[in-house]
Image: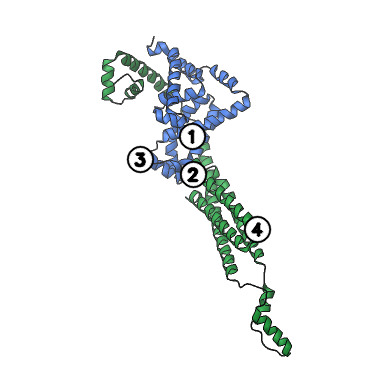
Amino acid sequence: MPLEAQLAERASSGDAVAFRQIYERHSPAVWRFLRDLIRDDSAAEECMQETFVRAHTKLSTVREGDKLCPWLLGIARNVWYEHSRKRRRMVGSSEATLEAEADAGPSPEASLLGREADRILAAALSRLSEERRAALLLQMDHGLAYADIAKVMGWSLAKVKVEIHRARLVLREDLKRYLGDE
Amino acid sequence: MSCNPDKLLLLVRGHRVADVEAHVERCTTCRRELDVLRAEQGLFSRRAGAAPPPPARVWEAVARQVAVENDRRVRGRSRRLFFLRMGGLALFAAAAVVLVLSQRPRPATPAPQLAANQEQSSDAGSMVPLTNTSAPRQARRHVDPLVTLSKAEREYKRTITTLEAEYAELWTGIDHQVRDRYDREIASMRKLVLKTRAAADKDIHGRRRVLDVYAAYVKTLRTVLIEEGIR
């Protein structure tokens, strides 16, 4: 049995150390994913907490051969989706929110880094719709294959390819100088 | 091999794919695309490397909540065990009711022999013993079987309400596909109970069938709870 499935089995039967190991191993990626999507640290913390609590209750559904990272990112995606639906209901129409997100500009993290390319990358990412951004990040940041991205996002393989292609076009337009693509 | 940007990503991620590498050697478009993809990947990797880890308080909150959840699960498990035993007892009690009712002699109207004896004894004015001496006592003890059946039915209903409440409590934590299957099984059992009950009305045999269906429903609920709760 692969190590990840063993860990999941132990954690699901109440082994706190195994669950802690899963958290240590995968929390940086899940945290990065949620922060990139939500762009609000306190909301991302809430979603992160909910993701791992939910994961703990569902660990018994992990099957041999399942990779934990895409599985956790899938849960995080659902939590984020519920969070953004709730937020949209509170804010008003979804269009207003999307516009606000598009204008949000680079995250404070990128500004602090002070690297122009990072800043521009962050700005380019913020111009993408949330779902398209999620798909691109799953590929480029988390190294997921198309099939895994399709599972995480609940999309068809064709839709994943189209969305990532479109996201990449936007990104390349903004990052021409840094990608040597002029 | 023809140009395929998706396969170029494999090279970007450090995989060795001979036919892709050979193609890139020959194709300037793909070589150029590979360079751009590598540059893009470099930007993302640097960004990921610079990202801060999650704050420690997130783990603390997760651990606290998981501990509460575990505790609730353990308490729920012992409560479920109690209700499962109760479900078993209800099944046993109802089976006993059905057994008693099915072996009970047909009551009330005196047998022709008994009637003849009674006539004869009153004619003779003597104390001739009756053929069936216990008959009057049985008639006094006679209880309407419908009442007994209704009692058993009430017991079943109470058990079912409790088991359904247990299932409702577990529901959100059950995997979607499994949950759908349980929901379908439970819905079909409920439908069967209602249908059999409506058809039975006051017919004793029909009411016994209703008890059988109740028993099957309790068994279904117990199986679901055992599968989900007592892992």
Tell me the green chain: B
Residue B112, given in percent of the width and then of the height, sits at 65, 79
Residue B77, given in percent of the width and then of the height, sits at 53, 51
Q: Are marks 4 and 3 in contact (CB under 8 Å)?
A: no
Residue ID for mark 2: B178
Gap in angstroms between the C-alphas marked 3 and 2: 25 Å
Gap in angstroms between the C-alphas marked 2 and 1: 18 Å
Tell me the blue chain: A
Judge left or right: residue B125 versus residue B35: right
Q: Earlier in the sequence, mark 4 or mark 2?
A: 2
Q: Label 3 marks which chain's residue?
A: A
Element at badge 1? helix
Q: Are marks 1 and 3 on the same chain?
A: yes
Q: Are marks 4 and 2 on the same chain?
A: yes
Pick whichever, B184 or B221, lies toward us: B184
Residue B201's label in the rendered image is 4
Gap in angstroms between the C-alphas marked 1 and 4: 50 Å
Q: Are marks 1 and 3 in contact (CB under 8 Å)?
A: no
Pick whichever, B103 or A108, lies toward us: B103
Residue ID for mark 3: A2
Frontmost of labels 4 and 3 is: 4
Frontmost of labels 1 and 4 is: 4
Element at badge 3? loop
Q: Residue furthest top?
A: A182
Residue A75's label in the rendered image is 1
